[in-house]
Amino acid sequence: MDARDAGTDISEVLVSEEAIAGRLAELARQVEADYEGRDVLLVGVLKGAVMIMADFVRALHRHAPMDWMAVSSYGSGTKSSGVVRILKDLEADVSGVHVLIVEDIIDSGLTLSWLVGNLRARGAASVEVLTLLRKPDAAKVDVEVRYVGFDIPDAFVVGYGLDYDQRYRNLGFVGTLAEHVHAP
Ligand code: 5GP
């Protein structure tokens, strides 16, 4: 799906397909250098991280197995509460493993903070985080995010894995929704 297919639903393109591809290549070089000589397991958080995982792992010039978790975060409306339930767990035992969590977006950071704690409690050798997008509120949480694609303003965004009511995930870019789509 591209901007034409979305019609007037997208008010602004925040991060273009080209910008995403360029930034993921840069992050891939950093990750290759940081994990040189060490195995790393990429852990994607479903469903939003599907696109970034698919593109990021192909940008890597090294082996990097993938595993997936699905979690639901209880919250009101578009804000999460930090109370998390596992809907789909990892297949791999991460004890002694270097884990790199691959995320679509960090807003409050509450979901991520829980996830990092959960993987550390399972005995992972290290847990680091790579996210495509980060919003300003993420600064309030004490999770260190080593790899950030783009810092974006505090707006609700869709595309490149991110949905509104399960739609727009298949847009190639990240954009803000027009008011007529989400206005009550
Ligand atoms: P947090 O716990 O950091 O507040 O929320 C993280 C999750 O909330 C993300 O993985 C994503 O599913 C959802 N989320 C946060 N901000 C946005 C946004 O702007 N657009 C969409 N589509 N989802 C968001």
Image (cartoon, rainbow, N blue to C red):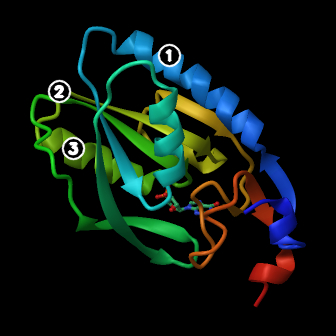
Question: Pointer 3: what residue?
Answer: 119
Compare residues 164 and 170 and report the one nearer the observer. Answer: 170
Where ligand 1 lies, by quadrant? bottom right
Figure disc tally:
3
Please state which amino acid type lies under the numbered disc 1.
Gln
Badge 3: few (under 14), some or many (20 or more) residues near its Cα, within 10 Å?
A: some
**Residue 164 in sight:** yes
Judging from the image, what secondary structure is the residue with disc 3 in?
helix
Image quadrant where residue 149 sits: top right
Residue 49 seen anywhere in this rendered image of the structure: no
Upstream in sequence: badge 1 or badge 3 = 1
Secondary element type, mark 1: helix
- Residue assigned mark 1: 30
Sequence-first tag of 2 and 1:
1
Contact between labelled residues 3 and 1, with CB atoms less than 8 Å apart: no
Looking at the picture, how far across and down is residue 111, in whole percent?
A: 40, 56
Q: Which residue is mark 2?
A: 125
Element on which disc 2 rests: loop
Looking at the image, residue 97 sits to the left or right of residue 31; the answer is left
Q: Residue at x 77, y 57 (%)?
A: 175
Count residues near mark 2 (Cα–Cα under 10 Å), then give few for <14, some for 14-19, many for 20+. Answer: few
> Which residue type carries mark 2?
Ala
Please report the residue visible at 75 percent of the width from the left and 81 percent of the height from the top: 182
State the residue lying farthest toward the bottom.
184
- The amino acid on which the numbered mark 3 sits, given as a three-letter code, is Leu
Quadrant location of the C terminus in the rendered image:
bottom right
In which quadrant of the rendered view does residue 38 lie?
Answer: top left
In front of the other: 61 or 164: 61
Residue 47: where, in percent of width, then height? 45, 62
For this rendering, which residue is in front, 143 or 3?
A: 3
State how far apart marks 3 and 2 are (Cα).
9 Å
Q: Residue 28 placed where, x, y %?
A: 51, 23
